[in-house]
Image: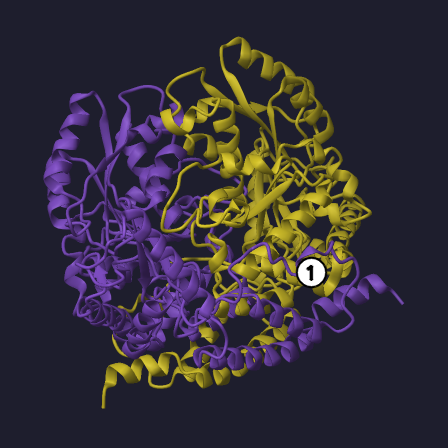
Chain colours: A yellow, B purple
Amino acid sequence: MDTKVDIIESIYDPEVFRQAGHRLVDQLTDYVLAARQGSMPVLPEPNPLALPESYQQPLPLEPAADVTVALHQRLQELIEQGIHLQHPGYIGHQVGAPVPAASLAELVAGVFNQSMAVYEMSPSATHIERQTARWLCKLVGWNKDADGVFTSGGSLGNLTALLVARNHASGGVAWEKGVRGGPPLAILASEQAHYSVARSASILGLGQENVLRVPVDRNFRMDTATMAECYHAAVAQGKKVAAVVASAGTTATGSFDPLREIGRFCRAQGVWFHVDGAHGASVLLSPQYRSLADGIELADSVIWDAHKLLFMPNVVTALLFRQGSHGFEAFSQEASYLFGRHPFPEYDLGLRTVECTRPMQAWKLWLCFQLYGARGLGELVTQKLDLARAFAAKIKAQADFELLTDPMCNILCFRHLPGGAGASTLSLQQLNEHQAKIRKRVLASGKFFLVQTLIGQRLYLRCALMNAQTTEQDLANLLELIRKCGAD
Amino acid sequence: MDTKVDIIESIYDPEVFRQAGHRLVDQLTDYVLAARQGSMPVLPEPNPLALPESYQQPLPLEPAADVTVALHQRLQELIEQGIHLQHPGYIGHQVGAPVPAASLAELVAGVFNQSMAVYEMSPSATHIERQTARWLCKLVGWNKDADGVFTSGGSLGNLTALLVARNHASGGVAWEKGVRGGPPLAILASEQAHYSVARSASILGLGQENVLRVPVDRNFRMDTATMAECYHAAVAQGKKVAAVVASAGTTATGSFDPLREIGRFCRAQGVWFHVDGAHGASVLLSPQYRSLADGIELADSVIWDAHKLLFMPNVVTALLFRQGSHGFEAFSQEASYLFGRHPFPEYDLGLRTVECTRPMQAWKLWLCFQLYGARGLGELVTQKLDLARAFAAKIKAQADFELLTDPMCNILCFRHLPGGAGASTLSLQQLNEHQAKIRKRVLASGKFFLVQTLIGQRLYLRCALMNAQTTEQDLANLLELIRKCGAD
């Protein structure tokens, strides 16, 4: 008996896939039902030092005795030690419980494995990605000149857009010659822009000192008057601004920068306008809230994470260009074993992404649009923003809570003020410690997962309402729990 | 009746997931069985202009009448227009039919959606990723100082490793100041290095002109004597070499650069040694073939794609550092809403990757190691390399075929010489056209998918044996088919 062939045959046995697959679907469904009922702590153990024995073992050398049983067990461990985004008390970071059909789409992608670099390796998935990009471009408000691709997350999306802007600003010289010559290139963004914007500047060789930070107003939106001053000051210093980056919305507070004003300024100055719509571009699908992104059509480039407010599994990021041809300015080289064998470069998506091999990302979103329509996915957005407004009203109605700012989308920052706003005698430091203590205790209760963020010198509790299961009653319960956790 | 709530409830209905999931598992299993029997053309239509009607429609506004039926139909379309990596005649690019258990792991990831940036969002998946990284570091031959993370594909892996090398070479100045000051930084790689290496240099602001290309020997391995000359010439010109990049193996021919020699040279010069093991690092799991990567332990950084020779679904790339602490030198900034809330930065993986939100990539590989052991996955590697040697012998035994070079791993380049090597009167141009014509016809037959690549001025047929279903008999049939396709 050839045991080598036996191992390979057993690994690829389609009937093992069928049997294990059915068992897995049931196991996952049961898990989701349990998680939604809140029958497990939302985050079992927030301390990484509690390293389970099983995660310390050396590499197993031999196959498991029964693959289906082993798969079941490994999944149980993953569940027991995991965070439960499906739990109604999960209101933490901007990642949510995925739309179930999109989770199934991951299985399809995992079997098909079409690779999004060259057309011939992903014929149907390329058509699907291109169609999805056209849909999103149209939602932005662009015409047929627009085009886009998908990439692995918003940070990579911002990097790629700013790479195009950098190359553009250098007059096409940077690709060949690097960024040593010519005037220093700068990037202008608000103090509240996502960290990946400043990171991108350093990756691209421009350096942190050429990231010009514009202050924000009291609603955490970029102050456009100061932006203009900042821009002209940079030019006067001999710098060339490669791009102005607006946030729609910001990570900490979900604020939307005034896109129309910024866009008009950029047009007038002839400077690249990039909109980081990772979190907020999805409001374009909500009739009630799409005006938050008013002016987004003035952008030269937009990124849009469908794994945030459209609830796709990680990750589905669209990188969109008003002039689709700009998308080809990120990179310019050839690989004879890959590209250029047909006269349709727009179908070889790897010419426009950092990634070569890339999973079928747009397929998940495309499928959900087919199943639920723009209206269905739009309702998911509207529901969360509605809920945020209801929660904000609730917080404002309590004397011992302070809301940082009215939420523009589904992110809220607030603090507990023991004894009420006027009565509190705690110092800044003590108040910060109070919030941190509350968060720790809330997490330990297993009932809610929320986060904290430093705004200026003040620590706030922060939540992103990313869960279709979370109700207004849950949020009322959260305030009660916080009060209890802050009681001594 | 509140139709908004109805839509959201139907989108998240766990029983719809269960029902559609079971149907999907059966549909996918049946598909795989059919594809493996070769009962469909491996690539139905290689022409992107044949745009199916369904991919031209505008964004659907309303939900589908029956979600389970719609899902089934959409998947059928995807199949009909897709490429079939499970087909025994699929021997094309370096992406293969995934291990079925890893495809199931994608479904798990699609439901759990743990995000690999901060520990609290991915407690079990972070332990799993760190454990997998340790296993791979040990296979490289490193001690406990080594560490790594996973990232979205080899191109991004190379970029991140070279970013560390760039920051390192600049004495830590590049992050803050950019790359304008100090000596120009250069990267040294062979002519056969993957295009992402040169791309990375331009992304990082160094420019194509600072990518120093070292010639290869007749087996397409970096010529180390010339490498040393090239290095010293660059230094003499005032450049500082930030990194030497070795390929293990190259994309076009699967050649392994002489890692030990290059590594020794780098140690002696104190220059960063990066090994692009995207394709070939997996030989470390094959007792028969691991010596191909002899010397890899001298590297400062290694990338390793498990979606290539370990047959994971796209993508699973490990980015490994001999000194794990170097992994933190890629980026250096804080985001208060994300990082730094516990004293264990090594558990916040987003501090070391371009991505912030990132899917559970290592989980797939980890699960397969648990199910099949190092031996099981190692056999997958060995099988393909054995098959390549058998195929090479077959090609060499035919008078009318020319093998470019003996395969080091599972990639072969060869040409058909009508009439035999001596007898052919065709010009270079005519011979190239002959190969291109053959490839077109082979693809049109639906029986095989292989690719072509330009080596110097000569066009070769190229195949990567990425399929556990492909037999020696299939490859004998391929040669017969090529002969027929080249017959007029």
The image shows residue A2 at horizontal and vertical percentages of 23, 86
Place residue A37 in its image quadrant: bottom right
Tell which of A106 and A465 is nearer to you. Answer: A106
- For image coordinates 30% across by 57% down, the residue present is B279
Place residue A9 in its image quadrant: bottom left
- Identity of the residue furthest to the top in this view: A236
What residue does disc 1 label? B53
Say left or right for A395 vs B242: right
- For image coordinates 81% across by 48% down, the residue present is A287
> Dot 1: what SS?
helix
The image shows residue A15 at horizontal and vertical percentages of 46, 86
- For image coordinates 51% across by 80% down, the residue present is B29
- For image coordinates 72% across by 25% down, the residue present is A261
Label 1 sits on what residue type?
Glu
- Residue A309 seen in the current view: yes
Say left or right for A79 vs A129: left
Tell which of B262 and A231 is nearer to you. Answer: B262
